Image (cartoon, rainbow, N blue to C red):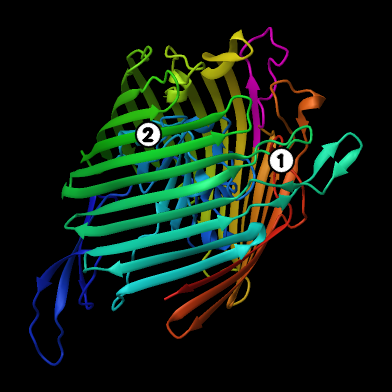
Amino acid sequence: MRIPLLRSTLYLVLAGCPAMSLKAQQQPDSSRTKDLREVSVTAPRSNREVSPGQQLKGAELQRLNSQSVADALRYFSGIQIKDYGGIGGLKTVDVRSMGSNHTGVFYDGIQLGNAQNGVIDLGRFSLDNMEEIALYNGQKSNILQPAKDYSSAAAIYLTSLKPRFAEGEQRHVKGTVKTGSFGLFNPSLLWQEKISRRVGASLSAEWVNANGQYKFRYQKQKGYDTTAVRKNTDINAIRLEGALHGVINGGEWNGKVYFYDSERGLPGFVVNNVFGHIDRQWDRNFFVQSSWRKDFSPRYTLLLNGKYAYDYTHYLAPDTVRYVDNRYHQQEAYFSAANQFVLTNWWHLGLSGDFQWNKMTADMTNFSYPQRFTTLVALASSVNFKRFSAQASLLNTIMNEETKKNAAAPFKRELTPAVFVSWQPFGSVPFTWRSFYKRIFRMPTFNDLYYTDLGNSNLKPEYTTQYNTGLTFNHTFPGQTLQELGLETDAYYIEVTDKIVAVPAASQFRWTMMNLGFVKIKGVDVKAKAVWKVLDELLLSTRATYTFQEARDFTDKSELFYGDQIPYIPKHSGSLIFGADYGAWDLNYSFIYTGERYNAKKNNPENYMQPWYTSDITLTYNRRVRQAKWRLSAQVNNLFNQYYDVVLSYPMPGRNFKFIVSVNI
């Protein structure tokens, strides 16, 4: 039977439980009795996910040994990673061909922002401090969430490791060192401390240093030359994170401080045998954020979030026709209050209000110095029965901007709905049908609106309208060789309207941003997973994804590329992960395939790009020595040494190696 709130009383022999609220309860003292504590556990009723996401977590995430979050996301269906090459290269994500700006990225429940260009570089988030990565199409099926969580066409949630301690534990320390190809030296440290029964702290530090150089192959008129070396690919980066996690009666809180500082070379594109770029970029990112949740009663819960962020970018391009040496400063302040009301056992209501302030300055000539004030209000409702769930939401976005110079963008107000439905037709069969509709938009970035000689302050939002239907089957088989089997398939249709594109203005040297694009996207995503226990010590696991996608440009019938596939979107793509655990040994094989695609709007032979695939393999040995757990890994990436470009003229590395040593105390 489902109840609106779980409020149970458990009697534990253990004297302390840091993750729960405690009340002292004295028991009679005798030779046969012990002092027991009454533990009151309070938690909101968990709703069935109407639209389940894709997750990588725990041992499965650890076995990948990926360098960054972007590397791990490649194994999700319906997703394309734009990788500009090397360890320090920019890495952005595109979900279902809607564009990078339509994907929100949330870190520990609060969105990462970039008002300048809307792009989040996923390469600067390491997996050494990551507990889970999840991708949701549409939005999470959660009523208690900030209005920001309703504001993206798709969302990626990154969850960092939280300190958890068994009885008698006071401290966890994990040290890791990665080395290998590209001159890589990458040490990291994770320290977790139990401050009290209710408060835990963690500190994560990482240094990445590499020259980034690797051989690549580029085409000449009479064949291939394999002697070229990718240069100006070095990176020197430091990441520091500190966090506090606490438990209160009927709730929890956390606070986080994040700092990232890097200098990297930008090797640029390779064309006409020119690949000696010397562009440089310096980034400094800082944010502090906090979250607080409390169940005030069985029928009311409040969630508060707050954040302040400061980002600095210095870009130097001394070898261009027009010398570029620019510095950009961004500030962001954010506050959110989310409320959940349990009206009945099966009906929940959510009301969220967010406010965000963005400001940008730069040392560019005639820069506008914009400020943006954004207010979001979301009203959501969900119903949950035994085999049927539904959620509907309505998001109101109000945006006002100010500038010191030039015209500011006009006042904007947008109202956007979403509806999600899930139904299990047969109670005895773990088979679920689910569908959703969502209309949402992305606001133009500061670059779109105000970039000198390029921006257009009168741009309209870029809309996406999504229709999705799918089937899910998940079942476990206790005591059987096949222990777990899961299958998911989704069919979707998406329209992107008023797409923002750059077009020539008075001359080829002066461009402007305009609302011109119209794209229709049709696709199918398939995900499958299985776990086998072959022997007492041998556990096998597989995870496979496949995506078929048609993303066609229907902007202008007079254009030769009308109806063609948009650039860099393959019709066929997929991935495979195979893992084997035997005693102290772990083996992981991963495969990624990206089909044929085109690098320009016109789908002709000159713009054709061949399919590419990579295979990575990792062998890991685990050993406990006294109180320390050692983990030794050897990894070969791009096992078959394939030369390929994810983005034209940005060659990717061939076969490369990595060795990882970690110790957990």
In this view, the residue farthest toward the bottom is 31
Is 224 positioned to the left or the right of 25 in the image?
right
* Residue plotted at (38% across, 30% down): 151
Please give the residue where the numbered disc 2 appears in the rendered image: 330
Q: Is residue 189 magenta?
A: no
Dividing the picture into quadrants, the one containing residue 651 is: top right
**Mark 1: few/some/many CA within 10 Å (<14, 14-19, 20+):** some
As measured in the structure, the alpha-carbon distance from the residue carrying label 2 to the one carrying label 1 is: 32 Å
Main structural element of the magenta stretch: helix, strand or loop?
loop
Question: Does label 2 or label 1 sit earlier along the sequence?
Answer: 2
- Nearer to the camera, 288 or 621: 288
Query: Is residue 24 found left or right of 44 in the rendered image?
Result: left
- State the residue position of label 1: 645
Give the residues in magenta.
548-568
Across and down, in percent, residue 36 comes to 16, 77
Would you place residue 526 above or below residue 355 in this image? below
The verdict on residue 558 being magenta is yes
Q: Is residue 501 left or right of residue 52?
A: right
Kindly tell me whether residue 242 is visible in this rendering: yes
- 314 and 371: which is toward the camera: 314
Which residue is found at the position 10% from the left and 71% from the top? Answer: 24
Seen at 42% across and 24% down, the residue is 446
| Residue type for callout 2 | Gln
State whether residue 396 appears in this view: no
Q: Nearer the viewer, mark 2 or mark 1?
A: 2
The type of residue carrying mark 1 is Asp
**Left or right: residue 217 compared with residue 266:** right
